[in-house]
Image: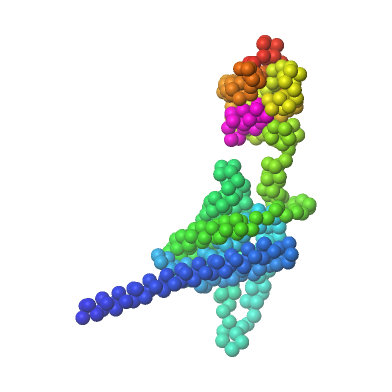
Amino acid sequence: MARPVARRRSVVSRGEDRMQIYNMIVLALLAAVYFLFLITLLHWRHRIGIGVFITVLGTMHFMETYLASAFYVHVPMATISPGSAVLFAGKLLMVLLLYVKEDAATVRQLIYGLLVGNVMIFVLGQVLNLQIAPVTADGAPADERLLRELGILMMWGTSLLYIDSIAIILLYERLGGLLGRGTLPRFFLAGAMVLTFDQIGFFGLLHWVTDAPPSVFWGGLAAKMVMNALFVAMTGLYLHFFRSNVPVMASKGIGDIFNDLTYREKYQDLLARTGRDALTGVLDRGRLEFDGPELVREALRQGQGASLMILDADRFKEINDRHGHLKGDEVLRDIASALNGSLRRNDRVYRFGGEEFVVICRDLGPGPACEAAERMRGRIGAIATLGEGRTVTVSIGVATAPEDGTTLLELIAVADRRLYRAKAEGRNRVVGD
């Protein structure tokens, strides 16, 4: 008798495995349909209006909250809700993609609309619960408990979404400083961190309201990580096949926390492509005057210090007079190339004017800054040549914050004085004190 029972158990087990795999395939299909529908609305937003995309995303918020409280399926190794695992993970990525494609002002409309709308749902739900003996259309008792629980969960879920939206944008931008401008790795890491935070926050209330077991938390977290990877992969395909220009941005300012986020990504991208010297390709003096003071302030605020170097090509007028201005231009380009090859990732080089360049290096004290300047001087001598074994030399003045000043102008003044000392002492040298 034991063998037939064991066989039946084996058949049941295989049937459950097939059911769980089938459910997983359906969830992947759900994610694909959800993504394709929303990305189509986002892609065509300039023709049909961004309001269509925002309204549809808001409508999905109600469904995902309902599913998170009342609809779960079994997949291999877990029991999960499609609302939490698929719809919410997809929505959070769409919020980030909306920010990248538009700005934080547009994201604000979505988040605040959901927040205010869900407050109204909660309030109306409490009023409706004052009704005596409500029923369904066929006369059965109405589910007042679901109405109450859904209102609470939607309020809490939207409050978390407000925090999530700010966090994922800030993480996306901060990761840009660590990973460069690679969009997909930043999407994935920011999404994974925020989805983990959201799972912790939402499950706490879900457990209190519906008595959901811990397995729901771990299964939901694993499912969100998988869906995050799937949505990022689909986003990568979209961005690869549909490259578009940055759209025209609104000109209105924002009076709340989103003000600090609005336009930042696109503004940084714009700065990266403008404010450059046409001849040498390095940043120009306008950029120095614009972002130099903030570089110094930020370095001092973080206790790092900063060093500023002014470089001047020695006897540059003679180079122009003897070899012509085209050769002079080539020398300036060689100097810029040598400087770029000597810099660390966070250092900045600017053409200050004529044959002068300014370099700002964070987290370098007086001694290391002079050593870095010597390396630059040597590299320029190896790259910039005049033929017949003659090389171009430079004189460099170095100033360091906070020792020599705490503002950009103070550092420039000190470095300039030291540059002229280097010239007076015979040129082709570094003076840092």
**Where in the figure is residue 201, as x and y percent of width and height?**
53, 58
Q: Is residue 212 left or right of residue 311?
A: left
Q: Residue furthest left?
A: 1
Is residue 329 found left or right of 73 in the rendered image?
right
Q: Nearer the viewer, residue 344 or 227?
A: 344
Coordinates of residue 348 in the picture (x, y in percent): 65, 32
Q: Tell me which residue sits at (65%, 26%) in the image.
A: 335
Number of numbered tags placed on the structure image:
0
Q: Residue at x 51, y 72 (%)?
A: 71
Is residue 251 placed above or below 81 in the rendered structure? above
Tell me the quadrant of the picture where the C terminus can be found.
Answer: top right
Q: Position of residue 137 (x, y in %)?
A: 61, 87
Asked which quadrant contains residue 294, the reply is top right
Residue at left 68%, top 22%? 311
Quarter of the image for residue 145 reads bottom right
The residue segment tinted magenta is: 333-350
* Residue 265 percent coordinates (x, y): 67, 48
Is 60 left or right of 4, judged from the image as shown?
Answer: right
- Regarding residue 374, the answer to whether it shows in the image is yes
Query: For residue 340: magenta?
Result: yes
